[in-house]
Amino acid sequence: MNEPIKSGDLCEVIAGALGSTGPNIGKRVTVGQLRGDHSVHGRIWRCHGEGLVTEYGALGNEADFAQSWLRKLPPEKTPAPAEQREEETRG
């Protein structure tokens, strides 16, 4: 079963206020604080990322997204300490 989106998750933006044509589509964001529930869009999250455009057209590193506009990505795998040491000695 898929876990619901929660603070700290890495997500891809798949939709927005302009549907599937918005300026944030395809960007990766880190989910931050729960902002509340919207009467139409449901749960709203404050997310952080590079070059995000808010609903007001401002460019910055955080914006609010409905949960349905986000696709949770699997956690990035970090190499085990032994693998990391092998890479360092080769490089």
Image: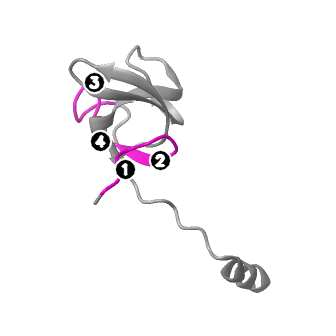
Q: Please state the extent of the stretch shown in magenta in the rendering.
A: 2-22
4 or 1: mark nearer the eye:
1
Q: Is residue 38 left or right of residue 78?
A: left
- The numbered disc on residue 9 is 2
Quickly name the residue at label 4.
Answer: 14
Image x and y of residue 34, in percent: 44, 29
| Alpha-carbon span between mark 3 and mark 1 | 19 Å
3 or 1: mark nearer the eye:
1
Check contact, mark 1 vs mark 2: CB within 8 A.
yes
Image x and y of residue 64, in percent: 42, 25
Q: Quadrant of the N terminus?
A: bottom left
Amino acid type of the residue tagged 1 in the rendering: Lys
Q: Residue 9: within the magenta?
A: yes
Q: How is the image coloured?
A: one colour
Quickly name the residue at label 3.
Answer: 17
| Alpha-carbon span between mark 4 and mark 2 | 15 Å
Q: Secondary structure at mark 3?
A: loop
Classify 10 Å Cα crowding around label 2: few (below 14), some (14-19), many (20 and above).
Answer: some
| Alpha-carbon span between mark 4 and mark 1 | 10 Å
